[in-house]
Amino acid sequence: MKGTWAIFKKDLYLFLLTPSSYLSISAVFIALSTLFFNQFFLLGQSSLPSLFHLMSWFFVFIIPALSMGSWSEEKQEDTMALLFGLPLSTLSLILGKYLAQFCQVLLFILISLPIPIMLIQISDPDFGPIISGYLGIIFLALFHLAHGQFFSSLTRHPILAYCLSSITALLFMGLSHQLLQYQLPVPIAKFLFEMGLAPHFNRLVNGVISLKQCCYFIGYILGFLSLTWTSLEIQRQRP
Amino acid sequence: MITVKDLSHQYGNTNALKNISFHINPGEIIGLIGPNGAGKSTLMSLLTGIIGIQNGHCQIKGKSIKTHRQSLQTQIGYLSETNPLYSQLSVQEFLLFIAQARQLHHKQIPSAIKTSMQRCHLEEKANHPIHTLSKGYQQRVGIAQAIIHQPEILILDEPMNGLDPKQMRQIRSLITELQASCTIIISSHILSEIEELCPRLLILNKATLLADMATKELKKNNHHLESAFLSLIEGTL
């Protein structure tokens, strides 16, 4: 765990050292607030679920940008040899980077907090859906980070990793879409619907926390992290 | 200390190493020389556990690097030819990261950083971001990270890269000083440095171990190591 902690601190510190991190956090806050308050003032309707849905679409493009460099930049800078020369398991390296990126996403989630705080002040909300909604957002972030790490481990080009990860995120977001299911045989349509992110995320956003949703997200996260581990182990064997 | 037997490695269909065998005793300083593409860096990456062993055996202190990679890596310090560093970090921050990743005890870390910086004459640059340092200083940061945990085996790939004559002399005396507690393998194209530091040579050519001999023996018929080395790899010795 000490090694994981060292990788975690290094990656998070490098993120905080970069001025573009602060610029992107500010840009996300401005864009999120603008879109949310447009709905709020112009349409006269806004709720926390709509904030969570807005954030879920932001994540499709932001999280791949955070995860794209996790391995590909190490390869580009030649620092993979430095990491592989340290007495650390591949799992420690993956976990250290994964947790550091999760903290980076938490910063993006934290900057959205003034919006729910304001909504809570002007209404009498039920705290259950707020908690489950944030749980949904956290699961979603961990999910996107996991496939982002995997694609980053496959290439030395961060932009390619970004594209692959964004496409995967979009694919999973769209799998449950009605248009995609139109005219498909019912069992396949049902299978695709359940494989997609939307039904599981929506249930959490609507205040339903069930074992099925947790297993869905945890299963995918562990699956993509295992793929990352396999990819790095293969590279360690045959660079 | 290090026993290598029938070690082979391939990149795709290309042989990087073919049936290499040798033994290194504790406290020896070995010069690993050969032309570009001979397999020196691959051999060093295999010895440090950075890349996995495909064929053959490599034992360090009686333990196979294949099965005890992590525990053996705690005893190995490695400076790679490309000297990879996190250039946004300061020297001190980088060495702190390496010390923590090498899982040194937290009480040992400040003194380990201080000692490695002192040995590599980096104290005045401790708080400078690495990317602002000259190549010579960056090379010294690379050496400092390789010795921070007081390794029993030190593997240095082109340690004199980018150093001026004064810095070379400092690093040479550091290597001589480390010999008391370390087994050292040095790869360098600067044969005069190898001649001065290494009493024994491993000479690689075209992925095979061409010679394992004392430096004096190689120089026996030739006054200069460089011409003796060239004669050997051209097959005229």
Image: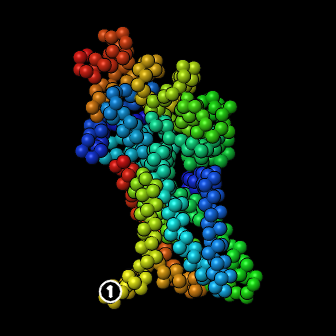
Residue with the most extreme bottom position: A186
Front one among A48 and B108? A48
Residue with the most extreme right position: A121
Element carrying mark 1: loop
Front one among B121 and A103? A103
Q: Residue under mark 1: which chain is it in?
A: A
Q: In the rendered image, which quarter is residue A21 located in?
A: bottom right
* Residue appearing at x 39%, y 50% in the figure: A236
Counting from the top left corner in percent of width and height, residue A29 is at 65, 67
Residue with the most extreme front position: A42
Q: Is residue B10 above or below residue A227?
A: above
The residue that disc 1 covers is A184
Is residue B146 shown to the viewer in this render? yes
Counting from the top left corner in percent of width and height, residue B68 is at 43, 48
Q: Is residue A186 above or below residue A139?
A: below
Q: In the rendered image, which quarter is residue A51 located in?
A: bottom right
* Residue appearing at x 28%, y 17% in the figure: B231
Counting from the top left corner in percent of width and height, residue A69 is at 50, 55
Disc 1: CA contacts within 10 A as few (<14), some (14-19) or many (>=20): few
Is residue B199 shown to the viewer in this render? no
Counting from the top left corner in percent of width and height, residue B145 is at 56, 38
Q: Which amino acid does label 1 sit on?
A: Leu
Q: In the rendered image, which quarter is residue A121 located in?
A: bottom right
Q: Is residue B14 left or right of residue A133?
A: left
Front one among B234 and A109? A109
Front one among B139 and A93? B139
* Residue appearing at x 34%, y 27% in the figure: B34
Q: Check the picture and name the quadrant holding the N terminus of chain A.
A: bottom right
Q: How is the image coloured?
A: rainbow
Q: Is residue B232 left or right of residue A227?
A: left
* Residue appearing at x 50%, y 55% in the figure: A70
Q: In this view, does A165 lie to the left or right of A206?
A: left
